[in-house]
Amino acid sequence: MSASLKRLTQQEREAIRQELDGHMEDHMEALRELGYDEQEAEARTLAAMGDPAEVGRELNRQYTGWGWVLLSRAAVLLTVVLCVQALLGLGILDNFYDSVRARILPEDLMMDNDFSPQVVTHPDIRVTAGSDVLRIYRVSVGTFGKNIYAAEVAMVAYDRIPGGVVSDRLTADAEFVDQWGWTINSMSGRGNGSFGADYSLQYLPIQEGDTYITLRYDRLGEDVAVKIPLPEGSVS
Amino acid sequence: MGGTKNEAKAAPKREKLPARRRRVIRRIAIFLLLLLAVNYVMHLGYLLPVQGIRDIEARQGAPHGETLARLWTPEVHRTHLVYLRGSERAVTIADTYLTIYGWMGGFGWTLDCTEESPLYAGEMTMNGDGRQETVCCYYGRVDDPEIVRVEISVRAVGYAGTTETWEETASLPVEPEDFIAREEGRYFLVEDVIDNWPDNTFRQAWITAYNGGGDVVTEFQIMEGTHSHF
């Protein structure tokens, strides 16, 4: 029968041989348990297997087409290549981690040395802009440098879908406006980011008595405005 | 009841898939699942250059657009491609190249086309590590139907004493037939490869739009864009 199994890979041939051996062994075992001796059990088992040529032809029908073999090997090769790429790029997983972390527990950005906070609050303001979300998670008031009354705003942008690529233009193009409608120019700011999350920390001059500032983002047809309440606190 | 039995007997027997085909389907399914996971979680293993471009669009905060033009720029990298993508609200230029991780997005710049301007223009310049040439791509969108032709003037600007002087190093016309027309506007993408730039000067690009009579509709210096080094 083995001779009639043409066009089989070595692996397939071995698999068939093992499977048939197993079947025959089981059959012989069963016959022996029924009281047949070794030779008779073997003869009956071989007879039960049928015409080897016919079995070979049936098996050949299950293993037709070298195209499938090539396709199968290509799929294995591509999977191996992909695994190697994934292993080499393990560091890139940070993007996914950053994206998930930004929505659960954002990085506690270090305050500027020139900023002396009086009151620190941790609001959770989230606003959607396009496919991203901008989250304001720390707002403080205090003094910046030589007694300039200032607010500190810590924010992070992330994609709406965990693991998605975030825009680095969202925090960069966000503007702040005071409660009288004047644009506030940031005195100092810094940020860091990855494909998963984009952080920004801004220090904005404010007036004593200000109760809120407004964050605006007007780009690509997205017109977002969100009020950020300033924590109440006395500044000497 | 007998009828039911006969019907059951008559039901066609489900044919088992040949072993090789079964194995191929299983292996391809494993590959596709892994590919999807690696693409999505790690943003690598991209089989198509446009997947890298989509990452750059996301990075720019731009909506995913339609591919309007493609340039192969071997002066930067053997596999380096520049894509022009447009949508109603934005036009994006972005580049991608083939690495051992698959196609990777490089850099890009998006022009906001929601400002009701007659003409939007930007630039993207690139050069490869250790290569002399700088590839300059100028792109944009014409929203004013009166504009039939635009011209980009690349200038080497320097100073003679305290006086600013300039010399045109290239003039890149975009004729009516060069525009890529879509419902929202007409797009353009032109390329200039610089391999010998005049000493002690810096580059400026100006764009001029003309109407059918040859009069200037608008003219401005291209200020938006990005430079990347590979």
Image (cartoon, rainbow, N blue to C red):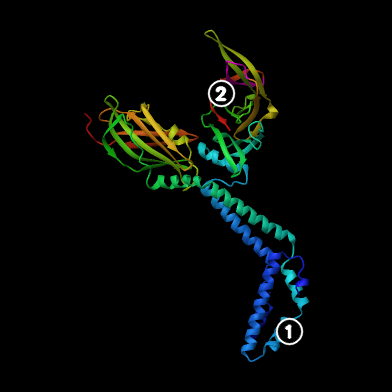
Residue A177 counted in the magenta span: no
Relative to residue B49, is residue B4 depicted above or below?
Answer: below
Residue B60 in the image, given as x and y percentages of width and height: 51, 36
Which sits in the foreground, B183 or A104? A104
- Left or right: A115, with B15 as reference point: left
Residue A111 in the image, given as x and y percentages of width and height: 33, 34
Residue B211 counted in the magenta span: yes
**Residue placed under numbered mark 2 in the picture:** B222
- Left or right: B195, with A165 as reference point: right
1 vs 2, front mark: 1
Residue A118, by quadrant, is top left
Residue A177 in the image, given as x and y percentages of width and height: 36, 30
Residue range highlighted in magenta: B197-212
Q: Quadrant of the N terminus of chain A?
A: bottom right
**Residue placed under numbered mark 1 in the picture:** A47
Which sits in the foreground, B205 or B127? B127
Amino acid type indicated by mark 2: Ile
Mark 2 — on which chain does it sit? B
Amino acid type indicated by mark 1: Ala
Relative to residue B113, is residue A81 depicted above or below?
Answer: below
Helix, strand or loop at label 1? It is helix
Circle 1 packing at 10 Å, graded few (<14), some (14-19), many (20+), is: few
